[in-house]
Image (cartoon, helix red, strand yellow):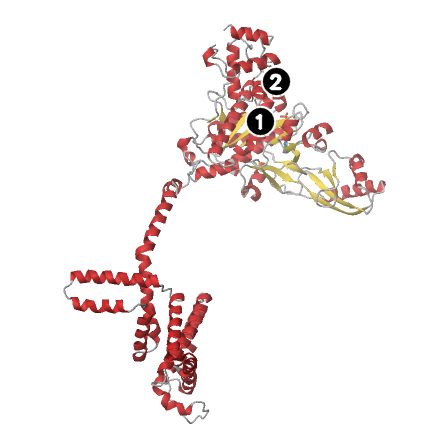
Amino acid sequence: MLGLALLFSFVSYFFTWQADQSIIGLADRNVESKNWLSKFGSNIAHFFIYDGFGISSFIFATLVTLTGVYLFFDYTKKQLKKFWFWGILLMIWFSIFFGFFHIKNSLLSGVIGYEINDLSQDYIGLTGTILLMIFLAIIYLVVRLKITPELVANTFQKTKKSIAKDFSSQDGTSEIKKPENKLNNTPTVETSFETSKISEEITTSPTPETTTPIVSTEEFQVEIPEEEEMEMKVEEVTEEKEGKKNLSDKLVADFGEFDPTLELSGYKFPTIELLKDYTAGQGITINQEELEENKNRIVETLNNYKIGIASIKATVGPTVTLYEIVPEAGIRISKIKNLEDDIALSLSALGIRIIAPIPGRGTIGIEVPNKNPKTVSMRSTIASPKFQSAEMELPLGLGKTISNETFVVDLAKMPHLLMAGATGQGKSVGLNAILTSLLYKKHPAEVKFVLVDPKKVELTLFNKIERHFLAKLPGDEDAIITDTNKVITTLNSLCIEMDQRYDLLKDAYVRNIKEYNDKFKARKLNPEEGHKFLPYIVLVIDEFADLIMTAGKEVETPIARLAQLARAIGIHLIVATQRPSVNVITGIIKANFPARIAFRVTSKIDSRTILDSGGADQLIGRGDMLYTQGNELVRIQCAFVDTPEVADITDFIGGQKAYPDAHILPEYIGEEGGTTLDNNINERDALFRDAAEVLVIAQQGSASLLQRKLKLGYNRAGRIIDQLEAAGIVGPFEGSKARQVTVPTIEALNQLLDSE
Ligand SMILES: Nc1ncnc2c1ncn2[C@@H]1O[C@H](COP(=O)(O)OP(=O)(O)OP(=O)(O)O)[C@@H](O)[C@H]1O
């Protein structure tokens, strides 16, 4: 508004200045001003125009208006600053410039313009002043308006061309010659620019005076690059980009991301109603009497041993209650730990566990079993928000912790799980809970199970979901493996699958299955090059001890290999065993299974084997378990899922549309599959002789020996063994035992081979 007021008063000042001049500065109210804004207008206009910068004060008024607009609309302040800087300079330049015409009209330059002009004429003379002004004008044009000599030359050339065109198409030559001459005669644009300015400023209103020539030159400036240079460049860039904007983007745009679940798009996840709610109406009831009683006994027992307690706190869990005590200052923790049995005796309870100290809390924990333990139902675990909202690749809802929190872990992060527990302590229920968790969270396209069940009865229910969730060897009837020999073949087949997956990952330049699948979903990997969506494979082995007993190293070696390498390509192992003795859970297996679950075991030694510490021997059974992932132990009450519930779930899934077959694992031609005993010398492996020597020296016909000594893959070693059998160097397959070597010495071997 101030800017507009200035503009109005400036404009009207031109008509009324002579009349108002006499009243300037007078505060007399009787005197009237003819200015549109009365005395304010005449005073302010007089100050700016007469005493200040003359006609160029309009630039100032414009700047003030512009500032108002910028502030009102909250535009960038940087641009505004630029306007002010150049506006003020332009105002000074014009007021000095109009100083030349001061005599004719004193309003043009204002006092400041006139004085500066006069001063400079005194010092550098009229010519000097004119040259200086021209110099300043050139600077303004080049710096502010970016009008460079090249641009001017270009403009001239263009105009020349168009004139020449017109010239050839028209007859009236004299008319066109005129402007051409004019253009040629003016060597720089500045001079022509200035003359046009002068004439315009004197005759017309001052506001457009400065802008008209500028705008016209700007138009020129923009036109040239747009027509000649810019377009060419833009075309090139976009062409290149579009060419490179890979096929995948186009495919995704056309078909959307690849959806692995498409084939079974109508698949319905099992509903929560299929699970029973064992806790219905139970809730967590706190038995105050029991709590008080236990507390008193703990305090009493400790007092008997002269251990004072500063404070005691209880947390009631589903099966055990944790009493956290803070001993008085100066009490040794080891003293309390040594009293474990005495406290157990005084509480007359099984399964007391003392945690001294509880990591991260600074207290000592005494876990005492509840008189009335609660069952944690699978239903409550699955329905818990923690499980439902778990953003995990393979979420497992294991049960509830001592503070009644649902315990959910990611199998993909573990990356393999070892479970141990004496018979009847809840191991099979635990396995079912794990499988149920995955069935509730994963689509059949995302995960496949390889189930090994030497007991033959534990996992049979899962047969019903064979064509949805199970993986099997080609040609096999049953997907659930119960036969030891099949286990060896399956494990080796998984090793081949692992190698193949690593090759795919390598080709796709990714490091793990998640990145690979993401890339595949984004259609960046070509299925024609062998790429495919890779489901997670979960290998579950029940009764591992039984397997080790019958197959020994033949099972251990591929398991160790899978455990070491398979995490990145999405093969995860869950191994359960009754007897966690050291010859079952060997060092190499232990090292690769950081996540472990221990149900109740019978001895401290077993507990140490599985957990590397005691504690599992003090559990109370029935799903009471300890979980570790390499660091501290967490006591969990395993979720309970009964066989009829599992049957319902597998019925529900099995009744839906399925894939034509189970997921087929790669074929493994091992020792067992050596049916083609064709003794063809020409088709022998290049390492045939070396392999024969290795076996003869070792007097042991095993494929894994060849793999180790000659650094071979399973496939190749198996093939060589077949060839050796065909050549009569090793005996036939003998189950878990290594084959017999029929050639006693190297000399005999050489003789045999040379005579062939
Ligand atoms: N989480 C649990 N909550 C309540 N009860 C449980 C739980 N887990 C197991 N039980 C009880 O313990 C019994 C034995 O469990 P389970 O069959 O899982 O034992 P196991 O360790 O697999 O035995 P085995 O090794 O002989 O197969 C179950 O029938 C059930 O009554």
The residue lying at 23 percent from left, 68 percent from top is 181
Q: Which residue is mark 2?
A: 550
On the question of residue 534 being in view, the answer is no
Q: Which residue is mark 1?
A: 561
**Ligand 1 lies in quarter:** top right
Q: Amino acid at mark 2?
A: Thr
> Mark 1 or 2, which is nearer the eye?
1
Q: How far apart are labels 1 and 2 at the CA level?
A: 19 Å
Task: Return the x and y of residue 16 as percentages of the image width and height.
Answer: 35, 87
Q: Nearer the viewer, residue 242 or 424?
A: 242
Kindly identify which numbered label has been placed on residue 670.
Answer: none
Label 1 sits on a secondary structure element that is helix
Task: Return the x and y of residue 212 as percentages of the image width and height.
Answer: 32, 71
Q: Amino acid at mark 1?
A: Arg
Write down the quadrant of residue 572 in the picture: top right
Q: Nearer the viewer, residue 22 or 589?
A: 22
Horizontal side of residue 674 vs 416, given as left or right: left
**Label 1 Cα neighbours within 10 Å, binned few <14 / some 14-19 / many ≥20:** some
Write down the quadrant of residue 357 in the picture: top right
Task: Return the x and y of residue 113 as percentages of the image width and height.
Answer: 41, 81
Label 2 sits on a secondary structure element that is helix
Q: Nearer the viewer, residue 376 or 465?
A: 465
